[in-house]
Amino acid sequence: MLLHEYLRQSAHRSPDKIALVTGQTRHTYSSLSSSARGLAAFLHANGLQKGERVAVYLDNCVEAVISIFGILEAGGCFVVINNTAPPERLGFIANHCSARFLIAPQHRLDLVHKAQALCTTVPQLIITGNNVGHDIGTSFESACKAQPSTSIPQIIDLDLAAIIYTSGSTGEPKGVTFAHRNIDSAVDSIIEYLENNSEDVILGVLPLSFGYGLLQLLVTFKTGARLVLEKGFGFPYELARRIKDERVAGFAGVPTMYAILTQLESLANEDFSSLRYITNAAAAMPPPFIPKIKKIFPTARIYLMHGLTECLRTTYLPPDQLEQRPTSVGRGMPNVELWISDADGKRLPYGQTGELVVQGSNVMLGYWNDPVTTARVITAGRYPWERVLHSGDLFRQDEEGYFYFVARKDEVIKSRGERIAPKEIEDVLYQLDEVHEARVIGVPDPILGQAIRAEIVLKEGRSLTERQVKAYCREHLEDFKTPTVVAFVPALPKTAGGKIKRTGDIAPTT
């Protein structure tokens, strides 16, 4: 199924149904569809060709939603760029993907102009906001009022639909490309295991530039449900109120969000009976969080999942397995085949650690304009028509087929001749009640090779010493896994999606 047909068909079935809630404003399927078709007509009339890229530099707002579906309707490829990106990153992405148009807010024009200066071919501007002058670009509002066109080219499910740029924490961001069928396959699988339906209300707080956040929108519109779209997770009490007031059935988060929610003890007295499920992806959920989440949301089924930008989603753990396997991310989701291989590509037996390999319709086409890196991660399968993705994630699998995340290949710490997974140490740190967030990284050491550095954000009003932390780790870990350095920091570096960065600069101490 083509992605823009999600909106078109839901609007045909239920034109007056509320599809989207932004702030205090409610938008029907028919109004969104009309605006998206108008934008598509404008883009086509102004030269957008099939497969050309349109950059969307907006926060989580109705204009971003209309942009995504309007671009797809026109046969183009959407590239959502996080609205907090600095001009250097915005310019790099717009130039790298040769964006034909750039949709951006009026209040950030100074930044946009700086980004345009970095582009070899300057994209045409479509500007959201009031009283947009013709000298700076086309008004988004007027573009959406263009008369729908019948001359838009035929689109098939193999056509380019989206480029999602990686966070770029270890170098320049890479553009992960998807055809309609890649994303549609992932959406169908997610709908199947989460049992989404048209009566659902889904709360979206993750950026639409983030694959995990984008999927909330697409799942909602394919099922004809309702999305409550928030700017972010800055005010947890306000979001808790939204869950109650909007009768939210599904919520997607990352561990940093759950770390905040589990500290708000007063939430345990609130009524969240509408919440049927919550999900976790992007980073592993520390096991100590789970009983605390259950206390706040007793009716919600908790789905632990794994995914990566290059295929969107790989696994999910059925909620009835949570108590038995709290450190597992489950089995492969529907329509995906997974296995673990060694460095030579040989499949490994149960219990051994190796790289997770993914095969399925959801696997990306490749990295935009980067055939060398693409060839490293996508290889031929058993037959000429098969393509498999080497995830870069180290996993092990138990005898019943459940997968357990160990570490990213490039995050493994090599100390004293041993290979150490940071997550194993972090899980122990999270058992300390005083710990709000933790990150374990390797830092260069002339004797050890790498020393283990644990960075800890303490809960408000709580205290710990380095000596106490090391003593606790020695009780629960082998000697060589005990942190060499324990640093108490005010905050940890995070990606735009709220995920703690595993690599990068050392966090400053308090």
Image (cartoon, rainbow, N blue to C red):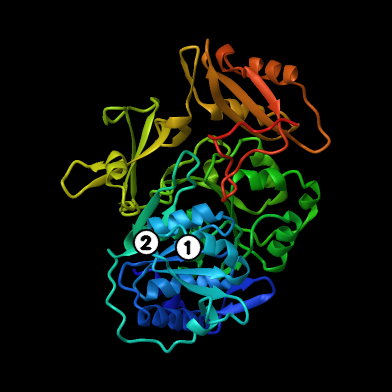
Q: Which of the pair 219/318 is nearer the observer? A: 219
Name the residue at the left extreme.
Answer: 384
Mark 1 lies on residue: 116
1 or 2: tag closer to the N-terminus: 2
Picture coordinates of residue 470 (x, y %)? 68, 17
Tell whether 303 sits left or right of 377.
Answer: right
Q: Residue at x 40, y 64 (%)?
A: 99
Picture coordinates of residue 366 (x, y %)? 31, 50
Picture coordinates of residue 248 (x, y %)? 64, 64
Q: Is residue 462 above or below residue 330?
A: above
Name the residue at the bottom extreme.
Answer: 147
Q: Is residue 193 visible?
A: no
Tag 2: amino acid: Ser
Tag 1: amino acid: Gln
Figure quadrant of the N terminus: bottom left
Name the residue at the top extreme.
Answer: 447
On the image, which quarter does residue 467 sit in?
top right
Q: Is residue 396 visible?
A: yes
Tell whether 407 sits left or right of 322.
Answer: left
Q: Which of the pair 362/69 is nearer the observer? A: 69
In front: label 1 or label 2: 1
- How far apart marks 1 and 2 lie (CA) works out to 11 Å
Picture coordinates of residue 367 (x, y %)? 34, 50
Q: Residue at x 53, y 64 (%)?
A: 113
For label 1, count other residues whose C-alpha is less than 10 Å away and answer few (under 14), some (14-19) or many (20+).
Answer: many
Q: Residue at x 34, y 41 (%)?
A: 338
Local SS, label 1: helix
Local SS, label 2: loop
Figure quadrant of the C terminus: top right
Mark 2 lies on residue: 98
Say the numbered circle drawn on residue 51.
Answer: none
Q: Residue at x 80, y 28 (%)?
A: 463
